[in-house]
Image (cartoon, rainbow, N blue to C red):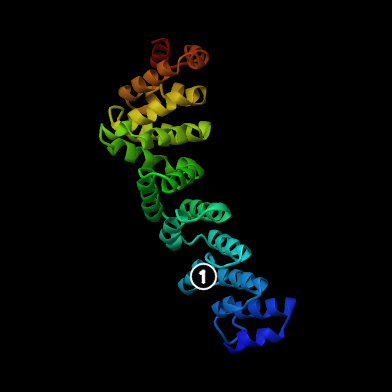
Amino acid sequence: RVHVRVLVGLTGDRRLQVVLGAAHGQAGCGIADFLEVLEVAVRVATVHALGRRLTRAALDPLLASTRDPSPDVRRAAYQVLRERGDPRVLPALLQKAGKLQGPDRAWCLGCVARLIQHADAERRTRALRLLLVGVQRKGAVQRDALTLLHQLGPVAVPEILRTLAKATQSSLHDSWVARLERSLVRQGKALVPALLKELDDHPSFSRRAHLAGALLSRLGAAAVPGLVARLDIARTGSFDKCQHAGRILRAIGAPAVTPLLKSRRHPAPLERQRALD
């Protein structure tokens, strides 16, 4: 508290030096105390100083700074949380995002997307499942969840397909399912490797493989090379998976013709026959 009062007698760069000095243990007070100073520049510097401390104790003041009256301080807080990449703040930010508007909402969503990308598998899965629950609601919560899933791209594909595969037959006609599928298709060719992996990892008769195939057929020409390669049983290890790739290619139609003609010259007789079929 003494150091906070001392700041009143300092100006400009000297104040920032005191804050940054506190970050390296050169001042005898908690860094968070500087968040009480009226000057915005000092509070911004405090936020960045807190970001240098990789401790749990630094997270609470950083989260509190996302509610600061100054947009400069709030933006700095989201930036620091994003750069730290600590997934422990994900639940708080996910809960907060639906209540925000304007730039704060964009800063918060960008921060959440980055944290999910860098989280370990368990935390990422937990966060994605929370987002997919949000997709099934209405209004701002659904919009935020769809925005985040779109930003995450291929990372979110396994959990999205798991959720769609578990959906009941009646819920498949709900608007959230269509919006989620449209969000996936809009990502275009970037999604193809993740969907092809779903074909490789799951039996061709499974619901997840069926969903992945339906999305690949909607992606059209971008999916053709990977599907043609899966006509080779030596690669897939399963005749059923070769047949499934062929069915998706038939659904794609004209864009698949030229690659299939090239496959007619493949050295493997079975792949030549599958291309002809």
Q: Is residue 53 above or below residue 257?
A: below
The residue at 36%/53% (across/down) is: 126
Q: Position of residue 105 (x, y in %)?
A: 52, 53
The residue at 51%/44% (across/down) is: 151
Extreme residue in the top direction:
276
Extreme residue in the bottom direction:
2
- In the depicted view, which residue is nearer to us: 230 or 71? 71
Q: Position of residue 273 (x, y in %)?
A: 39, 11
The residue at 37%/54% (across/down) is: 122
Q: Position of residue 38 (x, y in %)?
A: 63, 76
Residue occupied by mark 1: 54
- Residue 199 as seen in the image, left or right of residue 82: left
Q: Is residue 209 above or below residue 23?
A: above
Three-letter amino acid code at the position of disc 1 = Leu
Callout 1: few (<14), some (14-19), or many (20+) C-alpha neighbours within 10 Å? few
- In the depicted view, which residue is nearer to us: 269 or 110? 110
Q: Position of residue 185 (x, y in %)?
A: 47, 31
